[in-house]
Amino acid sequence: MHPAFSVVFFTTATGAGYGLLALLGVLGGFQIIPADFWLGLIGIGLALGLIAAGLLSSTGHLSRPERAWRAFSQWRSSWLSREGVASVATFIPAGLFGIGWVLLGKTGGWVSAAGLLAAVGAIVTVYTTGMIYASLKPIAQWHSRFTLPAYLIFSAMTGGVLLNALCQGFAIGSKMLLAACVLLTVLGWGWKLATWLHNDRLEIPTTANTATGLAGGTVRSLEWPHTEENYLLKEMGFRIARKHSARLRQITQALAFALPVLLLAATFALPWPFAAVPSVLAAIVQFAGMLVERWLFFAEAKHTVTLYYGR
Amino acid sequence: MTCLPSQTDKKLGLVIDLDTCVGCQACVTACKEWNTGGHMAPLTDIDPYGGHVDGVWFNRVHSYEHTTEAGGRTVNFPRSCLHCETPACVTVCPTGASYKRASDGIVLIDESKCIGCKLCSWACPYGAREFDSDVGVMKKCTLCVDRIYNDNLAEEDRVPACVAACPTSARHFGDLGDPHSAVSQLVAERGGVDLMPELGYRPTNKYLPPRAHTQRAASVPAKALEPVRAEGGFLGWVDRMLSN
């Protein structure tokens, strides 16, 4: 599948944004993180900023963005429409929580309720994003039990590492949060390795035989219907990543998982304000690594239409 | 509405005979000619005379070499929308632009609602949908809705353009929901198959597999031809000496 940068950035940025929003909503709403104006402003601002930037980027993927409002209508059948509804609906409790927690400095009561609702909205939105990909049967690497948990784990992981960077920066970092971030990153790493292992061993029942209805023997593409690459090959016959996939997987592991774990471990050992440096670096490096991971997620995915072209 | 009708009154579709298709591309050309002025017009061509030709086509004919124990053969394979009974291309559409008609089962796109997100083309395993980057919307086969119900055409012309154009009658059009229709009978008689049945899209269009290989072909008594011109030089001398 062609990795359009708008979609790669969209899913990575909103994943981190919703993860951060959910954690702020729960931890802030229940006073586990103290209500602090600047921490709150930057935290909520960063979460909503990432979400808004991602959503804007996703409309950049549309050829007719002026009709994007129509995408809220088909939530009964379409995961993409559900994602649109959930993402916009989440802004309401998130905005209320921001007003209560940051501007009024309140917790408890309606502020906690808004925080909790924002967290629920964030999780639902990430769930719908994952389901868009997990529900696509023609792409076996996506239509697997690994896809949906991956979106949820990576959202919690990148959101958690961002929150840790913020808390370390404001000198309210906790060992609990730090340990949770290390655990989430290791969990994400393990999940990604398991996904790659699963995909590499995938036995796809759909073959050139079933695609053409020609039973038995071998079906070899003799001649394409066209001499140049068409829309189908440009969009779904993307092959560059398969050439470089081993190296790109190493880069993903280094940036998204290994380096962040090392930097977070360094944070344990350092006092404030020095602890803030590796924590912030971990968040930045991990975000870059997740962009590579998401790029590979698209580029390594193989669509059944390529069977018609002998690819 | 992108929810699917629980059932359709008719299941209009095509039956394509892989035994008789000669790969002449007449259906491809006729489809393009009709539809570039039809319901989903235009079928944009980009850089049509340049080095990077691209464009929207509803029907593409591939050629394959099918090799089995019985022998090998070339199979020409027309590929277009199969108007599935459970088309995921419709249900994934976030705007309601894609829909399946309850009356005849044809899968269509309302261009004025399409946002060009391309998700439907990802959801189609058959590559039936092609994006028109010039107009910014997705396009697909309409089963020639503007021909099959067109009172301005003579009755025999009220079939999809590809069917009308086929010189070997490899393409048949009809109601596959009616077991007594000519197309249903043909499918039953020839063992018509679904493409990628394992994905569960339940395509309406059926493909008739090539007939079995036969051993009744005429034998060829003539010897294989040999080169006429004599070799020169030393090897030519050896050849002449040994031939005597």
Image: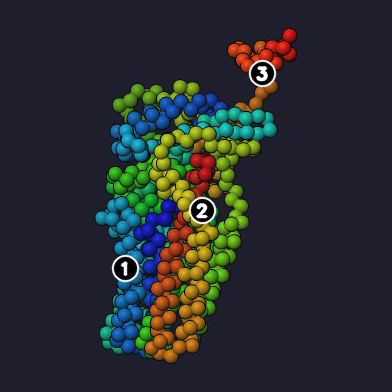
Circle nearer the N terminus (2, 1) = 1
Q: Is residue A57 left or right of residue B226?
A: left
Mark 2 secondary-structure assignment: helix
Check the residue under mark 2 and report the chain it is in: A
User: What whole-number distance in Å separates the C-alpha atoms at marks 2 and 1?
Assistant: 32 Å
Asked if the residues shown at circle 3 and circle 2 are in contact, with their CB atoms under 8 angstroms apart, the answer is no
Which residue is nearer to you in this view: A189 or A114? Answer: A189
Residue B56 picture location, percent across and down: 36, 39
Q: Amino acid at mark 3?
A: Leu
Q: Are marks 3 and 2 on the same chain?
A: no
* Residue identifier under label 3: B235
Specify whether residue B118 is in view: yes
Q: Nearer the viewer, mark 3 or mark 2?
A: 3
Specify whether residue A82 is in view: no
Q: Residue at x 30, y 63 (%)?
A: A56
Number of marks in the image?
3
Check the residue under mark 1 and report the chain it is in: A
Residue B26 picture location, percent across and down: 42, 26
* Residue identifier under label 1: A52
Q: Residue at x 66, y 12 (%)?
A: B222
Whether A307 is drawn above or below A7: the answer is above
- Label of residue A242 in the image: 2
Q: Is residue B46 left or right of residue B77?
A: left
Which residue is nearer to you in this view: B65 or A58? Answer: B65
Q: Amino acid at mark 1?
A: Ala
Q: Amino acid at mark 2?
A: Arg
Q: Is residue A243 left or right of residue B46?
A: right
Mark 3 secondary-structure assignment: helix
